Image (spheres, helix red, strand yellow):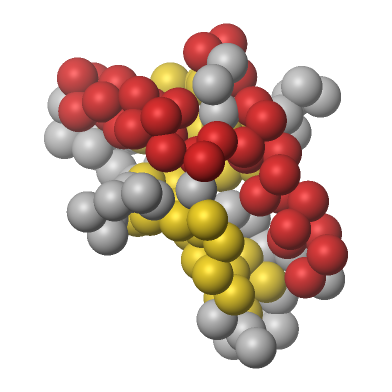
């Protein structure tokens, strides 16, 4: 089973990574000023992850592929790693859809 890991950045902001069952990071959040906001971001990912239309499939200028997961209001709530092909990016999306709703939360800031 995958998990969300909450960490603190060097600038004091909180962020989370969603790890797949194999330990690979499949989604990273923006920075949040409070842990409560970070937890709300995780809940938003859990809610929006199963909805295909919430994924913005992108191609970077260097030819890599990635995606953003957006909330209902259009705000980005998570960004993927870079993938070498559109197919592997799409596999990453499927992994988030499957992993996020039932992922546990580990808080490494305690």
Report the front residue among 100 and 62.
100
Rendered residue at 82%/71% (across/down): 34
Location of residue 35 with respect to 47 vertically, above or below: below
Position of 36 relative to 93 (above/below): below
Foreground residue, 1 or 61?
A: 1
- Is there any visible trace of residue 7 in the rendered image? yes
Residue 35: percent from the left, percent from the top?
77, 70
Q: Quadrant of the C terminus?
A: bottom right
Q: Is residue 2 left or right of residue 89?
A: right
Determine the residue positioned at 27% across, 59% down. Answer: 23
Q: Is residue 79 visible?
A: no
Q: Does residue 79 appear to the left or right of 77 in the view shown? A: left
Q: Quadrant of residue 69?
A: top right
Image location of residue 42, percent across then percent down: 66, 49
Residue 105, picture quadrant:
bottom right
11 in relation to 57, above or below: below
How many circles with numbers are drawn on the protein? Answer: 0
Task: Report the residue at 29% width, 43% height from top.
Answer: 82
Residue 20 lies left or right of residue 12; in this view the side is left
Q: Residue at x 70, y 83 (%)?
A: 12
Residue 2 in percent (x, y) is at 39, 50
Along the line of sight, the residue nearer the viewer: 89 or 110: 110
The quarter of the displayed image where residue 108 is located: bottom right
Against 38, residue 100 (above or below) is above
């Amino acid at each position: 089973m995958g998990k969300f890991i909450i960490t603190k950045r060097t600038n004091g902001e909180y962020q989370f990574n969603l790890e797949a069952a194999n330990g690979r990071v499949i989604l990273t959040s923006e920075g949040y000023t409070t842990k409560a906001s970070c937890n709300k971001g995780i809940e938003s990912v859990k809610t929006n992850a199963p909805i295909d239309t919430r994924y913005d499939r992108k191609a970077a200028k260097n030819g890599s592929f990635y995606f953003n997961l957006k909330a209902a209001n259009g705000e980005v709530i998570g960004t993927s790693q870079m993938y070498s092909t559109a197919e592997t990016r799409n596999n990453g999306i499927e992994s988030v859809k499957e992993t996020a709703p039932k992922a546990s939360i580990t808080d490494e800031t305690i």
